[in-house]
Image (cartoon, grey):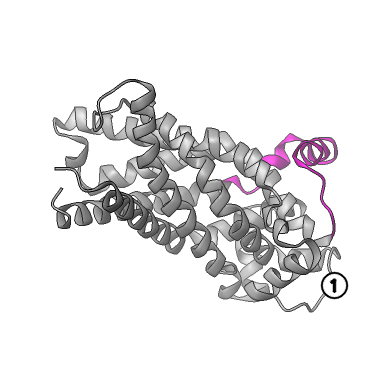
């Protein structure tokens, strides 16, 4: 028997939060390297150089810079995303004139995931802005875009945004976030469900019975598909959010054209290597934590 809608919403929200926590803890150093290479591509020859340089300059803590807002961002995003995902599946059933609780196709689940990303974008944009600024602060100082010696903590970044731009300043890069999330999560959930369906078909079992390794591979594969599709958009979003620290930053189109004109198209893929290295363990951990915590809570609720 399906649990009460409120209980179901709480379960989806909590399972998403558990998944977001697992995702950050397993992949934060790679995310730091990604943001640094996206915003300052000429400073580093590649992923390994960025990793080693950061470690030499500011130690291991430099690779975990922005972990607090990253945890806040991923917990908020994934909690809202998976809560909305469940509700958006009901919306897709309604629009498709299907019975409540009827199984959706992989394509329909991908559409529900894309729709859910509208709501998660509103949750992640402020915390991701703080995270990106913390991660790239050393490079902003080294390039002369901001004064050296500034204290770099979550609270100082928050105060700076509020002082210079007000509460709406936290939503710089929101349009880029929407442009990244809508196609990205269509690919994300579509690839995840397709991969699980493929494993289930070959193993002669249900999607829920494929086991831990196929489940984690499906999550990693989904993350890889997402990033390959939306990476250039994410690069522009990171630049808008980081460079706006030094003053008003141009919008998405002007920033995009400026990068193409001055640095070339390949600059939009700077930092892709650490992203792809990170995506399998991070998204594998995300879905493992989500599916198992959700199953545990559903069993406890008697569903």
Give left or right: position of 108 versus 256: left
Range covered by the magenta-colored residues: 247-272
Residue depicted at 28% across the width and 35% down the height: 196
Residue 49 image offset from top left, x and y in percent: 64, 59
Residue 122 image offset from top left, x and y in percent: 57, 49
Q: Is residue 95 above or below residue 255?
A: above
Residue depicted at 62% across the width and 44% down the height: 177
Residue 128 image offset from top left, x and y in percent: 60, 57
Give left or right: position of 160 versus 111: right
Give the residue at mark 1. 147
Residue 118 in view of the camera? yes
Front in this rendered view, residue 181 or 134: 181
Residue depicted at 42% across the width and 39% down the height: 222
Residue 301 appears in which quarter of the rendering? Answer: bottom left
Going by the picture, which residue comes out furthest to the top? 97
Give left or right: position of 196 versus 53: left
Label 1 Cα neighbours within 10 Å, binned few <14 / some 14-19 / many ≥20: few
Q: Is residue 76 above or below residue 188?
A: below
Check disc 1 and report its element: helix, strand or loop: loop
Is residue 249 magenta-colored? yes
Q: Is residue 202 above or below residue 181?
A: above
Q: Main secondary structure of the magenta part?
A: helix
Give left or right: position of 57 versus 201: right
Q: Is residue 96 above or below residue 297?
A: above
Q: Which corner quadrant holds the N terminus?
A: top left
Front in this rendered view, residue 3 or 256: 3
Front in this rendered view, residue 45 or 221: 221
């Amino acid at each position: 028997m399906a649990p009460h809608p409120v209980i179901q919403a709480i379960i989806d929200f909590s399972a998403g939060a558990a998944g977001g926590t697992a995702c950050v803890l397993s992949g934060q150093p790679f995310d730091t390297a990604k943001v640094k290479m996206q915003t300052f591509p000429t400073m580093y020859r590649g992923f390994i150089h960025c990793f080693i340089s950061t470690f030499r300059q500011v130690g291991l803590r430099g690779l975990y810079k922005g972990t607090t807002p990253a945890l806040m961002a991923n917990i908020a995003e994934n909690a809202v995303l998976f809560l909305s995902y469940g509700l958006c599946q009901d919306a897709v059933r309604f629009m498709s004139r299907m019975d409540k609780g009827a199984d959706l196709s992989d394509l329909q689940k991908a559409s529900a995931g894309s729709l859910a990303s509208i709501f998660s974008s509103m949750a992640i944009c402020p915390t991701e802005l703080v995270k990106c600024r913390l991660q790239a602060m050393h490079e902003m100082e080294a390039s002369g875009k901001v004064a050296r010696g500034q204290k770099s903590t979550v609270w100082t970044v928050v105060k700076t945004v509020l002082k210079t731009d007000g509460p709406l300043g936290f939503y710089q890069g929101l349009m880029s976030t929407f442009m990244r999330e809508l196609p990205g999560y269509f690919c994300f959930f579509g690839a995840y469900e397709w991969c699980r369906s493929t494993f289930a078909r070959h193993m002669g079992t249900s999607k829920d019975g494929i086991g831990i390794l196929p489940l984690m591979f499906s999550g990693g594969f989904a993350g890889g598909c997402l990033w390959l599709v939306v990476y250039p958009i994410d690069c522009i979003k990171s630049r808008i959010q980081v460079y706006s620290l030094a003053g008003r930053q141009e919008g998405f189109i002007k920033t995009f054209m400026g990068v193409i004109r001055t640095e070339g198209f390949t600059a939009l893929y700077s930092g892709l290597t650490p992203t792809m290295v990170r995506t399998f363990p991070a998204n594998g951990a995300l879905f493992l934590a989500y599916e198992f915590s959700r199953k545990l809570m559903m069993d406890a609720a008697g569903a």
